Image (cartoon, grey):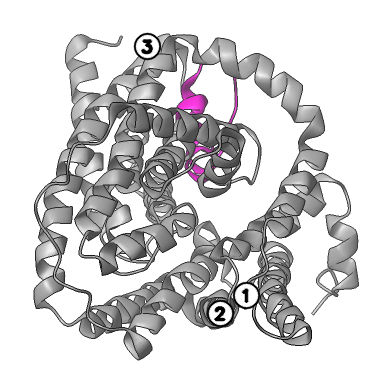
Amino acid sequence: MPTVLGDLGLLAVALIGAAVGCGLALLPGLHVFNVAGLALLLFTHGPAGLNEQDLAMFLLGALVGWAVVNVIPAVFLFAPDDANVIAVLPTTKYLMRGQGLEAALLVGAGSLGALLGLVLVAPILDAIIRPLRAILQPHAGWMLVAIVAFLLLGEWPRANDTAPPARRLLSAWTYLGAGLLTFVLSGLLGFVLLYRSPVPVEAAFVNLMPAFIGLFAVPGLLQILLFGAKPPPQSDALPTEIEPRLLLRGSLTGLSGGLFAGILPVVSGGIGGLLAGHATALWNERLFMISLGASKVAYYVGSLILLFVPGLTLARGGMAWMLSSIYVPYGWRSYWLAVAAVALCGALAFAALVALARAAARLINRLNVRWLASSALALAVAMTIGFTGGGGFVIMLVATTVGLIPVVVGGRRMNCLGVLLVPITLNVVGVGPTVAQWLGLLQPW
């Protein structure tokens, strides 16, 4: 029978998980889902008698800590994940103006606002999500197609208006073509990983890890290593007060986009935030970064919270999918424990973010950024080989080639999300196996 002491123990486990997640977030290219997959693998092959609920609360805390703090490598090392990638350009601008700490804390403020929003909306979350899911589920296919079309059509040609017409046309289509090429190639890579992955079966829980490291982390690190200049001295003073209206609007915008991404399959927090930002006409960089921080956390944490809603049986996002294979929450007590854990872990993670971001702002002035980039790159390669072997390393190299296209030629790095959007969208509309057959991925070796 559940007891108050047992509940406090579960909350303590969640706080330990949050502390671990904050540490993991500092490692560029390491996604919390990969660590969660390893933890689940060890749990299923470990000694009997371990409590599934303890593991669930630990992973919930780790997810909260990681989602809040992982903005630090995205700002100071240009090594984002799939949800942070859209915020790289404005945060880089702030870094090069000596305001990297402010950029990290703006994204963090949005994250904290989203966590607060999730806690406040928790009493009516079931009443919101259940009818919304019933409305959206039959239309998931064409909605995903529309989102893909929006992302591709959202690429805007960049050209010198004073150049001759032929040169302007070539310049514009070079930029647009780079974006389309990135999306198509990453989509083909996604098909390979889905239907004929070279990653060993025993490492299937980290099947996407080498692709994500190659697409999102390695290109930025190579850019610093080869062409990077030392950032200007960074201020380690806390930024000026954020206007309440900006914080409120950015948090609500990101929260709505993140929850939308959590309901619709495949759509990530970055895409959800981008859609919500367009829908609400975000107009400045500070507001944009707050919104992206909120969307990222609402997507990661909100999609896992949905797993705890009694009777909803909605597993969205990588953590919920993995956890649902061994743990099924039961009753409202588990749900409210999860909500309380989110609140406590969010407060801990934001405090850690402030301290760690200030430390990063001080260290970036003293350390050689190329040395940092080379160390982070070596760590990313070591993790890839250690988790996925030689096959994963090959995937990482291919993904890096694709990820370098928007870095070198132009185009939005979000186009790399074709690795998920293309195969899953085509599967949802029912033509994925046909395309895989055309590509020869269903043929025997």
Disc 1 residue type? Pro
Which of the 4 image quarters holds residue 81? bottom left
Q: Is residue 99 left or right of residue 80?
A: left
Kindly indicate whether the residue at mark 2 contacts the one at mark 1 (C-beta within 8 angstroms).
Answer: yes
Kindly identify which numbered label has been placed on residue 333. Answer: 3
Residue in front for this viewpoint, 307 or 251: 251
Residue 291: percent from the left, percent from the top? 43, 40
Q: Find disc 1 in the rendering and name its residue.
A: 198
Can residue 53 be seen in the rendering of this structure? no
For the C terminus, which image quadrant? bottom right
Q: Is residue 345 left or right of residue 305?
A: left
Q: Secondary structure at mark 3?
A: helix
Stretch of the chain drawn in magenta: 303-328
Residue 353: percent from the left, percent from the top? 20, 47
Which of the 4 image quarters holds residue 60? top left
Q: Find disc 2 in the rendering and name its residue.
A: 391
Magenta stretch encompasses residue 327: yes
Q: Residues within 10 Å of mark 3 (few under 14, many from 20)?
A: some
Kindly indicate whether the residue at mark 2 contacts the one at mark 3 (C-beta within 8 angstroms).
Answer: no
Residue in front for this viewpoint, 393 or 140: 140
Q: Is residue 351 left or right of residue 128?
A: left
Disc 2 residue type? Gly
Residue at 37% of width from left, 41% of height from top?
Answer: 290
Magenta stretch encompasses residue 204: no
In the figure, 34 relative to 368: above or below?
A: above
Identify the mark nearer the N-term, 3 or 2. Answer: 3
Q: Secondary structure at mark 1?
A: loop
Which of the 4 image quarters holds residue 201? bottom right
For the N terminus, which image quadrant? top left
Residue at 66% of width from left, 67% of height from top?
Answer: 193
Residue at 46% of width from left, 77% of height from top?
Answer: 219
In the figure, 276 relative to 77: above or below?
A: above
